[in-house]
Image: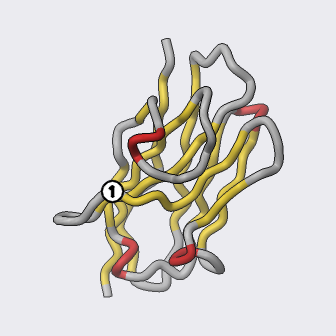
């Protein structure tokens, strides 16, 4: 049974850091896309970062470049989203998702077929 589990959210002040983790289990495939999305109240869900487990490719959306990094630990089936210098605008529910059998981009929710529960990130100014 496929499971996607995201964790690591919390509450920080602006300028602070958090690290989110996404653990994937139950996949029979070695190569697939794992992504992080976020959704703030009243806004659409947007893609933040993605990696491909079959290589070294990764992606960050422009608004987080220079502040966030995404990394993959294949030995642990885990993707990390390190978030530094957090802004109040980064506050949202963050979701981890996986895609099998398609291109990792475009980074849109409709592309991804396995989802974890969200983890809340709160940033106070």
> What is the crowding at mark 1: few (fewer than 14 residues within 10 Å), some, or many (at least 20)?
some
User: Is residue 9 depicted above or below 122 in this figure?
Assistant: above
Foreground residue among 16 and 63 = 63
Residue 74 location (% of width, % of height) = 76, 35
User: Splitting the image into 4 quarters, where does residue 123 fall?
Assistant: bottom left
The residue beneath circle 1 is 45
Residue 104 location (% of width, % of height) = 61, 45
Q: Is residue 37 left or right of residue 53?
A: left
User: Is residue 7 depicted above or below 61 in this figure?
Assistant: above
Q: Residue at x 60, y 70 (%)?
A: 68
User: Is residue 48 depicted above or below 114 in this figure?
Assistant: below
Q: Residue at x 66, y 32 (%)?
A: 32
Q: Residue at x 53, y 72 (%)?
A: 17
Q: Residue at x 39, y 54 (%)?
A: 94
Secondary structure at numbered mark 1: loop
**Number of labelled discs?**
1
Looking at the image, the residue that sits furthest to the right is: 55
Foreground residue among 109 and 28 = 109
User: Splitting the image into 4 quarters, where does residue 102 fall?
Assistant: top right
User: Is residue 93 depicted above or below 100 in this figure?
Assistant: below
Q: Is residue 109 left or right of residue 44?
A: right
């Amino acid at each position: 049974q496929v499971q996607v589990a995201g964790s690591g959210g919390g509450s920080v002040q602006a300028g602070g850091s958090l690290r989110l983790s996404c653990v994937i289990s139950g996949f029979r495939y070695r190569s697939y896309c794992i992504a992080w999305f976020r959704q703030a109240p009243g806004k659409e869900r947007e893609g933040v970062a993605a990696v491909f487990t079959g290589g070294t490719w990764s992606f960050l959306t422009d608004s987080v470049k220079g502040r966030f990094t995404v990394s993959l630990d294949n030995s642990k089936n885990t993707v990390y989203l390190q978030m530094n210098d957090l802004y109040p605008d980064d506050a949202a529910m963050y979701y981890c998702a996986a895609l099998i059998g398609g291109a990792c981009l475009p980074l849109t929710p409709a592309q991804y077929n396995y989802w974890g529960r969200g983890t809340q990130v709160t940033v106070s100014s």
